Amino acid sequence: MLGPRESSLWHMISAPTIWALHFCVVYGWTASVCARGPDPAAARLGIGIATAVALLGIAVVGWRAWRQWDYLDDYDYEHDGPSVEDRREFLGHAGWLLAIVSAIGVIFVGMPALFIETCL
Amino acid sequence: MAGSRRRAGRDPLNVGRVLPAVLIAILLGGCSGVQSVLDPAGRDAEVLARLFWWMLGGAVILWVLMNGLLVYVSRIDTRPLSARAAEWLIIGGGIVFPTVVLAGLLSFALSEMPEQRAPGSGLTVSVTGESWWWRVEYLPDGAETPVVSANEIRLPVGRRSEITLNAHRVIHSFWIPALGGKTDMIPGRETRMSLEPTRAGEFRGQCAEFCGESHALMALGAVVMDEDAFAAWLEKEAAPAVPPESDAARRGQAVFNAEGCGACHAVRGTAASGRVGPDLTHVGGRVSLAAGILPMTAEALMRWIRDPEAIKPGAMMPGYDHLSDDDLSALAAYLEGLT
């Protein structure tokens, strides 16, 4: 669905996409649970599950991107040549960095649930 | 270049030296006073002030380090970095360091938040944002009917009081910087906060969400009292209005009735029972007039009644400039006597 890993941009941006989905799910879930209930425990549980699932997804995406970059094979972090290999490594490298940013983003979005004990 | 230096040398006012001093004086003026975040008089405001000082301290340290580094690499040691050193600088200084610092600051700020939402004990004060004034209702523990007041909030010192917030037509925000954080007031949805004042005194609140043309003129007197004084005040506030004592005040009451003021304003214990405008039962006992804008004096009352629009653009109350000075003065005497 996302096209070939070596040349498709979609794989590169799948980690930020998970981050965006996590953001929407957490906000939507909290709003609806607190409007219905309010049930802070259910809100926190849902945020915890969504955060764990998102981090797992990002870890998988990040690991695949890291493999695609294959840094430890050739220690190559410049990918400006017009070759298939450079394109593959560039997309892997960028995907790996985006996975790190996305993981930090997901943690920061989920963190308030650790501290805040009420809906209001 | 040389020309500008000569001009600066002839500058009789020495703006280059005076201006920073003036700016510092203006900035330092915000460090204390009745409406300062940096001069806390409540438990929640103390937390917020501490948070501010930590953030400021951190920002100053980072600013000095960053600019020190910039000066170092551009002036003191201008040799190029090795590729490896540059890599570590980018990863360490660009990713790891900010992530750790931001995570620490976020955890610190978030850990302070539950306390800001702690439930109150005993007194509940319900505040409704109107255009552009505050409807204030006190509900002591166990009471069924609220004590209605306006444009001023009084709280007992050393006790956490529950504050419930509503808005009539548009969004407002309730904020008494010396006592605590701000909370939005939203039409159709009740929000809440709690305040625990730690020091008796007079403070000032301000609507902190743009709500129309007189938003900047929507302030709020905040008086923190010792527990006994507060209980005595609330008992007095709950009582009906005192009858006018002087001749002028009696005449003022007649003007009040003849002009139909009671259609919008309530003075409990009289026929006036309007709910549209602020309750005036004890208006003379408040620290300010027109939601924190004017002092509570006879002159200010006359000015306000004659032309509210001139003082608070868009105010719903019509002007009474057809009244003679005698009538206005009598009306002011009546209202001032409603303590």
Image (cartoon, coloured by chain):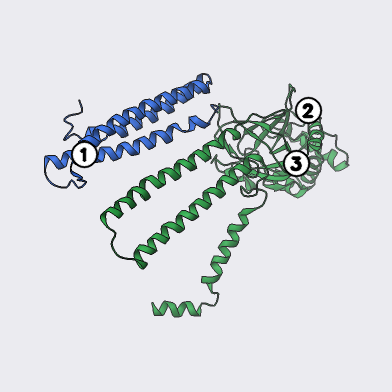
The quarter of the picture where residue B123 lies is: top right
Mark on residue B185?
Answer: none
Q: Is residue A78 left or right of residue B190?
A: left
Amino acid carrying label 2: it is Ala
> Do the residues bearing badges 2 and 3 touch, measured as CB atoms within 8 Å?
no
**Residue visible at 75% across and 46% down in the picture:** B296
According to the rendering, which colour does chain A have? Answer: blue
The quadrant of the rendering that contains the C terminus of chain B is: top right
Chain for disc number 3: B
Question: What is the distance, in whole Å, between disc 2 and disc 3 at their CAs?
Answer: 22 Å
Q: Is mark 1 on a helix, strand or loop?
A: helix
Mark toward the viewer: 3 or 1: 1
User: On the image, numbered disc 3 is attached to which residue?
Assistant: B286
Chain for disc number 2: B
**Residue visible at 48% across and 55% down in the picture:** B61
Count residues near mark 1 (Cα–Cα under 10 Å), then give few for <14, some for 14-19, many for 20+: many
Q: Can residue B260 be seen in this view?
A: no
Q: In this view, does A97 lie to the left or right of B233?
A: left
User: On the image, numbered disc 1 is attached to which residue?
Assistant: A69
Mark on residue B271?
Answer: 2
Q: Which of B129 and B75 is in front in this view?
A: B75
Q: Which of B157 and B210 is in front in this view?
A: B157
Tell me the green chain: B
The quarter of the picture where residue A26 lies is: top left
Amino acid carrying label 3: it is Arg
Amino acid carrying label 1: it is Trp
Question: What is the distance, in whole Å, between disc 3 and disc 1 at their CAs?
Answer: 71 Å
Q: Where is residue B303 in the image (x, y as percent from the top left)?
A: 71, 48
